[in-house]
Image (spheres, rainbow, N blue to C red):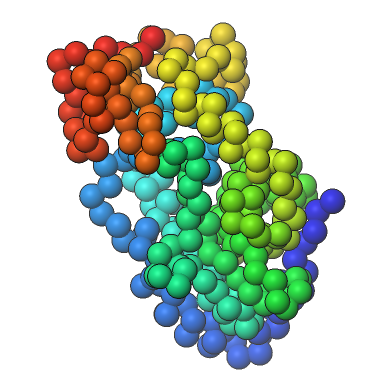
């Protein structure tokens, strides 16, 4: 059953109307400089760990290729602007919640961002924060925050079906975070990029879903060969538009780095070990490789 965060949405609309957005703009001014991801530079494109945001995808082989750095992510200008907008929208969501009296937390008492980690440091991620005082939940309950932007088509599907059906990857991502962080609920907020409509839903913790996907991450991470394809036909509609299609179906070589080498394997503390040299691979060497590199079959 979909549980819309009606009280939260009502509080936001009332507060905005009451002072014509003055409190919101003041809060937004405080939050925007804190959105580090929107301003980060010199990103190599590779992520050291398998992110919780990816583990809900249907194709294990696609996830494995990403974790193994089989293909360097490259995006056009439009997509990069969309990613940047997503980070900036986080500030707007935080401002809206602060405006209605929620207390928001993005780091622990030591100043470190709330993160989850598992599978020897090779799996993890960070939610968009933790909130206290969400109107649809008990006043003393802390809940996970997850913010997303949507196209008009995606937003309509979301409002008609709820997160679980419309965005199963997002649902799984939140379940993993709640499972690891010991939280009972998440507040999922989404904005329609076409008209600025807002959607908010309360997601209850499903411990089995969270545990199952941590286990799935463990299986994928320790595989030394690619998992089975979703389909043997490259024309299959779910494969046709996958950015790993050429590697998976058409024999395109993987990017040369230690993680695509048959001798490398993930080990404890988020590190990698070379079986040929019987040594831990320095993080700054992984993209360089040695002359014994051989692509995983």
Question: Considering only vertical position in the picture, is 195 above or below 135?
Answer: above
Q: Is residue 260 left or right of residue 228?
A: left
Q: Is 103 on the left-hand or right-hand side of 87?
A: right
The residue positioned 37% from the left and 48% from the top of the image is 80
Residue that sits furthest to the right in the current view: 1
| Residue 35 is at least partly visible in this image | yes
* Position in image of residue 157 (x %, y %): 71, 46
Please state the total of marks drawn on the protein image. Answer: 0
Q: Quadrant of residue 77?
A: top left
Q: Residue furthest bottom?
A: 19
Q: Is the residue 241 above or below the residue 276 in the image?
A: below
The image quadrant where one finds the C terminus is top left
Q: In the rendered view, tell whether residue 90 sits above or below residue 161.
A: below
Query: Where does the image place residue 113, in percent across and percent down from the top left?
Result: 43, 62
Residue drawn 49% across the image and 81% down it: 27
Which picture quadrant has residue 58?
top right
Name the foreground residue: 208 vs 58. Answer: 208
Which of 190/121 is in front?
A: 121
> Which residue is depicted at the point 47% across and 68% down?
108
| 276 with respect to 86 (left or right) | left
Instruction: Name the foreground residue: 208 vs 26.
Output: 208
Q: Position of residue 184 (x, y in %)?
A: 71, 59
Question: Residue visible at 60% across and 75% down?
Answer: 97
Quarter where residue 211 is shown: top right
Q: Residue furthest left?
A: 291
Determine if residue 201 is in view.
no
Residue 166, how many percent across, how many down? 70, 43
């Amino acid at each position: 059953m979909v549980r819309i965060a009606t009280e939260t949405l009502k509080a936001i609309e009332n507060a905005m109307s009451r002072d014509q957005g003055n409190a919101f703009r003041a809060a937004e001014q405080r939050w925007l400089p804190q959105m580090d991801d929107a301003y980060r530079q010199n990103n190599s494109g590779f992520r050291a760990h398998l992110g919780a945001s990816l583990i809900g995808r249907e194709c294990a082989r696609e996830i494995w290729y990403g974790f193994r750095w089989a293909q360097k992510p490259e995006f056009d200008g439009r997509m990069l602007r969309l990613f940047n907008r997503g980070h900036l929208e986080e500030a707007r969501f935080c401002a809206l919640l602060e405006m209605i009296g929620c207390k928001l937390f993005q780091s622990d008492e030591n100043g470190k961002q709330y993160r989850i980690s598992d599978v020897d440091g090779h799996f993890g991620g960070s939610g968009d924060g933790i909130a206290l005082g969400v109107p649809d939940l008990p006043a003393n309950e802390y809940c996970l925050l997850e913010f997303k932007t949507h196209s008009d088509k995606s937003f309509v599907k979301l409002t008609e079906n709820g997160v679980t059906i419309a965005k199963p990857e997002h649902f799984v991502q939140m379940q993993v975070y709640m499972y690891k962080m010991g939280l009972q609920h998440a507040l999922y907020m989404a904005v329609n990029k076409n008209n600025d409509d807002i959607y908010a839903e309360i997601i209850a913790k499903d411990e089995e879903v969270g545990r199952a996907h941590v286990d799935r991450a463990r299986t994928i991470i320790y595989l030394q060969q690619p998992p089975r394809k979703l389909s043997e036909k490259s024309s299959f509609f779910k494969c046709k538009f996958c950015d790993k299609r050429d590697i998976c179906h058409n024999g395109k070589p993987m990017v040369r780095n230690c993680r695509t080498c048959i001798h490398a394997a993930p080990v404890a503390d988020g590190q990698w070990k070379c079986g040929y040299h019987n040594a831990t691979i320095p993080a700054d060497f992984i993209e360089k490789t040695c002359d014994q590199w051989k692509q995983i079959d």
